Amino acid sequence: TEPDQGIAPVYALLRAAQHSIDLTMYELAKTQAVQVLETAAARGVTVRVILDINREKAANTPAYEALKAHGVQVIWADTRYAATHEKSIVVDRSVAAVMSLNLTSRYYSDTRDFAVLDRQPSDVAAIEQVFDADFRHANMPAPTGANLVWSPGSEPALLQIVNRASASLLLENEEIALPAVTSALVQAAHRGVAVTVVMTRQDDWAKDFDTLVAAHVGVRTYAPTAALYIHAKAIVADAGTSHQCAFIGSENFSAASLQHNLELGLLTADPGVVTSLASTIRSDA
């Protein structure tokens, strides 16, 4: 949980690598993160990195050049995606970190973000399959699986979480620019679900906020100048019940994110993850 726990757990994961690190990152602009990857490569770990080019090439170029000069296999992402917005790490092909955060130091101290470690072999293998294909700039359909939510094409999975909620919904996101999402949240509120949305306020989403408030959705917005910026992409449905479910990932509630970008999210009912996410979002609200 960022910024509460700091970035140290992510660096610890990278430093623990014995054989391989595969990293896909939208924005990598942190000298220490680059150094951790370079150090791993220097001690014989195979380090492969994919960086977004379509939107963040300028921000990523210093890291790209530094990594390339120090034995890291780094490439620019395939331009067929509007953006490679995924933020994931796979270490030793045995554990994956699925994240909403970028490895960019200026965001660490004041930005709400989440990361989850996934050790399910089928999930890790699927993430690696996609990474291997993306590293070759090869097309492949997103692997099927109950836990992973891939974009392009994740809108139905996210709407399903909202539509199935029966008691409560807690959401944090950076954007709310998709009418289907706003409509699903309104419908949930109308059927008696306690819906809470926490975001940083932007004028672009003002009409959506008004629509949600009119439907008695609890909307908590932070000013853009507030001490905390909501960058997380998380949903918690029916926390504390037998059918609780949480989503965490890189997907924003926008057509670009759900239909055109490369994105990755994770579904989980793990009690520790659900409880932590729910507690944080309620605190932010």
Image: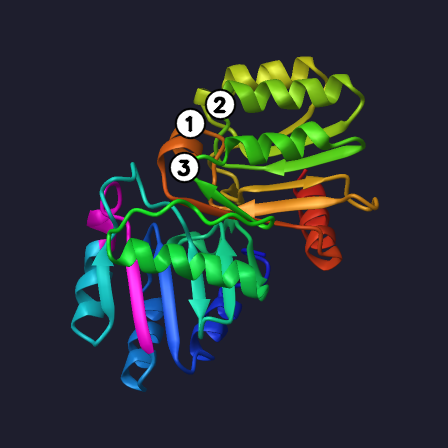
- State the residue at coordinates (57%, 36%): 157
Mark 3 vs mark 1, CA separation in Å:
10 Å
Q: CA distance from mark 1 to mark 2?
A: 6 Å
Residue 39: x and y in percent read 31, 80
Q: Amino acid at mark 1?
A: Ala
User: N-terminal of the two: label 1 or label 2?
Assistant: 2
For disc 3, the marked residue is 152
Residue type pointed to by label 2: Leu
Q: Tell me the quadrant of the picture where the N terminus can be found.
A: bottom right
Along the line of sight, the residue nearer the viewer: 245 or 205: 245
Q: Which residues are magenta?
A: 46-60
Is 200 above or below relative to 284? above
Please state if 123 lies on the left or on the right of 241 as rendered.
Answer: left
Residue 178's disc number:
2
Q: Secondary structure at mark 1?
A: helix
Q: Quadrant of the C terminus?
A: top right
At horizontal 75% and vertical 16% (from top left) the residue drawn is 190
Which badge, 2 or 3, is on the more N-terminal residue? 3
Q: In the image, is residue 47 part of the stretch drawn in magenta?
A: yes
Q: Which residue is mark 1?
A: 255
Disc 1 + disc 2, Cβ < 8 Å: yes
Q: Is residue 150 above or below residue 180?
A: below
107 in the magenta segment? no
Q: Is residue 168 above or below residue 277?
A: above
Disc 3 packing (10 Å; few <14; some 14–19; many ≥20) = many
Residue nearer the viewer, 145 or 1: 145
